[in-house]
Amino acid sequence: MNTSVLRAPAEQTYADELARLAAADDRPRPTGWRLSPRAVRAFVVGDDELGVSRKYYGDDALVERCVVTLMSNRGLLLVGEPGTAKSMLSELFAAAISGDSTTTIQGSSGTTTDQITYSWNYALLLDRGPSREALVPGPLFRALADGALCRFEEVTRVTPEIADVLIGVLSDKVLHVPELDGDAAHVFAAPGFNLVATANLRDRGVHEMSSALKRRFNFETVRPIADRRLEVRLVREQTDALLRDAQVATRMDTDVVDLLVTAFSDLRTGTTAEGTVVEKPTAVMSAAEAVAVGYAATLDAHYLGDQQVTGRHVARQLIGTVLKDEPSDGTKLRHYVDVVIKDRARSAQQWRAFYDARSELNR
Amino acid sequence: MTTLTVAGMRSLAGRLVTDDLVVVGVRHHSPACARVVMRVFAERTPSVVLVEGPRSFDPLVPLLTHPQARMPLAVYAYVDPLKVDDEERNGPRRQAAYYPFADYSPELVALRLAAEHGVPARFCDLDLVEHDLAGPNLPGHDGRGSLLDEGHYAHSQGLAALAARLGCRDAEDLWELLFETAGPLEAREHAARVCAYAAPAREDSRDTIDTDGTTAREAEMAHHVRAALAARAPGDGPVLVVVGAFHALALPDLLTDPPPRPSLEARDVRTGEALIRYTFDRMDRLHGYGAGMTSPGWYQRLWDRDRQAPEARGPNGGAAEPSRVSVVVDTLMDIVVALRQAEHEAPVPQTTAALEHALRLAALRGHSTPLRSDLLDAVTATMVRGDMDVDGTRTLDVVRKVLTGTAMGVVPPGAGRPPLVDDALDRARAAGLDVDTAKRSRISLDLYRKAKHRQTSRLLHGLVLLGAPLGVRTGGPDFVAGTKLGRLQERWEYSWNPAVEGALVEAALYGSTVPEAVAAKFDEALTQAGPGADQATAGLARALVLGLHEHAVAVVPRVRGALVGEPVFTDAVTAAVRLALLVESREPLEAMRVEGLDDLLAAAYRRVVYLGHESLTGEPPDVVGALVRVRELLVSQAGSALDAELFWPVVVAAAQGHDSPQVRGGASGLLFSAGRWDDAALGAALRGMLAGGAAHAVDFVVGLLTTAREAVWQIPAVLEVLDGFLVGWSEEDFLGFLPSLRLAFAELTPRETDQVAGQVAVRHGVSSLGPLVRRDVSARQVQANLELSLAVRCLLVRDGLGGWVA
């Protein structure tokens, strides 16, 4: 594993798993795919016999549907709330199918067609005129030419006029380069090309996709983890991985992880285990956020405390997660602390430690 | 017990299928098992047919196999203890359950073929009442579930593990893969396979079979099989036994080492069974009670297709691949048509994409042909254009309806009346209603003091819900709408007529007693109800009016959820007021039997306060009305537990900062009436409003008079302001504001009006204003007259004749 990079792409991190899967894979592969569909599935959901870890904790049927969609002539659009592992799935599919998850377009309101399709080396362009050498291929161009999976993150943040460049590519599987002549004017998709996009459908700053574009995709909704035990496992594993990378020896105890996951679950679903109803803050309380809070709390305890992570550390970081820009979220969080946590603080030590951070809420 | 090995299963199969005995282990509602039965009949005609089911169903066999009977039908079996004795815990309880039949049920196929071949056929299991005696610790059949016991498969860990290994979702998916996609097997091969399927489930349930009645039932079945074998002459056809695969496993050992026949005597009970028509929708709902395979419509298609094309068989006699795929295509086309009818776009390329997806998914999962779950997944992937929770639910609802199917059975002539009709008649007679003549009668029910009258009220309301027009409510308190609550008696007009009977026959598929049918119908209405707090609390009120107190327990969480999400202030207030009404109506509604009602009221109040701070929106008169109702709620008995101090800040904020002057006026009035604002404060508010312009001030006064009429004569400032307007306004302004002022002053009683008139007179230095009430003209006429006069005056002034006007 490459430790000089902050975060390596999935095909490097899991290179040995991919190699094992390829070696044991004797099933037919669609043209352009490095692994058979079943091996791609095994990469994502795990295979005990081959020593492949489970990376996605959720609905296996979703993974199967995604794999089949990527074999078809439609793109795959993963939608859902932030923090539900859509980008992770997109990365894993690209790593397994094409061996390369870096052919990515990051969507934003400033994305232009240059960043999607191609742009020019202007010096060469001016010197010798339009030619294939002067053309700088964008991610979509490369994916088409190489027959690989192209990732498009946050496709709904891109303005509809720009996003519609995908329509022609997805229906005819060809990209036109009018500046060039002859064969170079058309880039036909090599077998193995497809597009996997992600989007948050209900958020500020997202555009409505045109229905022509919607029709070129199969939509799959990625949901937050419903199973608490899985969520606890996920939070613990990911926090531990981050702490290992940062070379921090402190870890959260079981009861602190439970507290963290419970608090997130309460605020996400709006109901506590005891049945009390709480107002849901507008901030998204996803598993990814929980991992971030756990990580930050441990760092807080390690560097600024006595290396014992308590509910208080979690509370301090949680407040920052919930209070983003919506003032009413402050009221909701205070209400949660005053009604639910105060009650729990009477009988559980870590919840009492959490409640002790109450004063910090009055920021 | 046989070991779970291939050899073990084959040896077991060898004992299940012999020269004199053929045991076909089935899952109920399995077309594949039905085809095995057909094959047995084709290869060697049995001499007698035994089917798993209560013995008391024997008389119904001719009706089930009647040529005019159309499936789906169900047999409804019930047990009624004659004395309801609370101390007699050992006696049987009230029990009822359904036993559904479809064209592809192996049991029905066996019965039909037996009738065709003139072979005697009978049922061989314990009766319902004996079930209960054999398994006293069970929760029992409550009238909503099925007699077909297949819960073992769903709960088996072994089957779940096998399903996961073979790429299947659950035990149902696994069955479809292993059995429904293959052709009709020869009996011994089928026996081996079906035993292998049931064995893990049998293994996992080892601890419960003695106490859940299984042992007793299997002993009974074994007894019948032995008797049939003994009565068989050599050379006769074999004894054909159609029982659940779970029981088939145990049968060989029970035949070689027979246990004593259970003798369970049921005393003091009335039992019965009736054949009623049924629907695929109800059959699918029974699945929740562990009763067999879902999506009857899907299996019916597979069955029909197979019957249509017997020549398209594969190498081992199975349905050829293309035949099954063509069922998938047909189903997909029906789904597309339904989606288009529901105004959901489904163009042709999408349909082909869905089919391709289904086929590829099946291949990925290692299924030889697409299963129902593959089709469902394919539609999910290709036809949902957005978030699953938003766009997806509608699409999937449509898909489920298509897969479930809409078939409704027809009961053959001679089947008699469904039990629901008789039950309704019995209950009506017990309530003292005259239902034996066609006379129209009236009845008055004392809901507050007589329990028996409350029962009658519930019966009548319940029949209305079922669509049976026995009675029409002509008067009395309406707890759902919250009107006429001062009435103590509920009045009904009723008469029994054929329409009532017809409606009850139609409603028979909801249940066979009135409470059951009402509960089922109510549940259905509940799932279709909207999400708002108003609807949810109305649902709760309706449940109590109908006497569905056990059901109310299920409605409470819905209400809570609806309250928390309610965005509209006025609706939240309506919900809170209704809940308070339910809490207070102890006697007629017996609401104290519903737990958590007080909590609900508290939750509703909290929501009202929250919305009062965050979002006090709505039409101004409605908002003022809502504020008044909250005030009334807080001073009522039910509201005494609520914290009034949380409400006043809402009112103060409304009085000082709300956009609508009318709301500000109303809120100010509330504060004045409650003594929280004194004269000076109110006067200041009024003067402030006046500075904002005449229109604002009038609206403010309208609002004020709605909530604090007494302000007009008690506070000189108010009258001063009003007087100032009226003096200062032009004719046009006056006419413009006249309707609003009329509305405002309409709140006053005649005495109060007189009092105000007196004070006005004093201000203007006259002793009296003269008679104020005109009975000979209407307000509209006066308004029209004034407007006309104004128009005439303007014309005269325009023509320079202003001097003519006095």
Image (cartoon, rainbow, N blue to C red):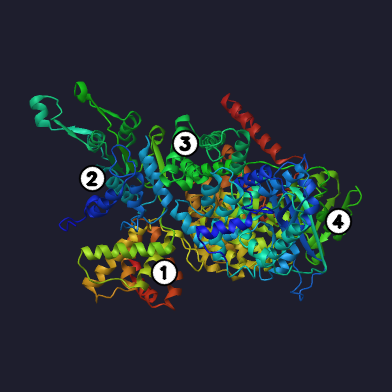
Q: Residue furthest front?
A: B234
Same chain check for tags 4 and 3:
yes
The residue marked by circle 1 belongs to what chain? A
Disc 4 crowd rating (10 Å Cα; few below 14, some 14-19, many 20+) is some
Find residue A337 and name its label. Answer: 1
Check disc 3 and report the residue beneath it.
B355
Quarter-of-image position of residue A98: top left
Q: Nearer the viewer, mark 3 or mark 1?
A: 3
| Front in this rendered view, residue B469 or B732 | B469
Check disc 2 and report the residue beneath it.
A102
Same chain check for tags 3 and 1:
no
Same chain check for tags 2 and 1:
yes
Please state which amino acid type lies under the numbered disc 4: Ile
Disc 3 crowd rating (10 Å Cα; few below 14, some 14-19, many 20+) is many
Residue B125 picture location, percent across and down? 72, 60
Q: Nearer the viewer, mark 4 or mark 3?
A: 3
Q: Nearer the viewer, mark 2 or mark 1?
A: 2
The residue marked by circle 4 belongs to what chain? B
Label 1 – label 4 distance at C-alpha: 56 Å
Label 4 – label 3 distance at C-alpha: 62 Å
Q: Is residue B69 above or below residue A308?
A: above
Please state which amino acid type lies under the numbered disc 2: Thr
The residue marked by circle 3 belongs to what chain? B
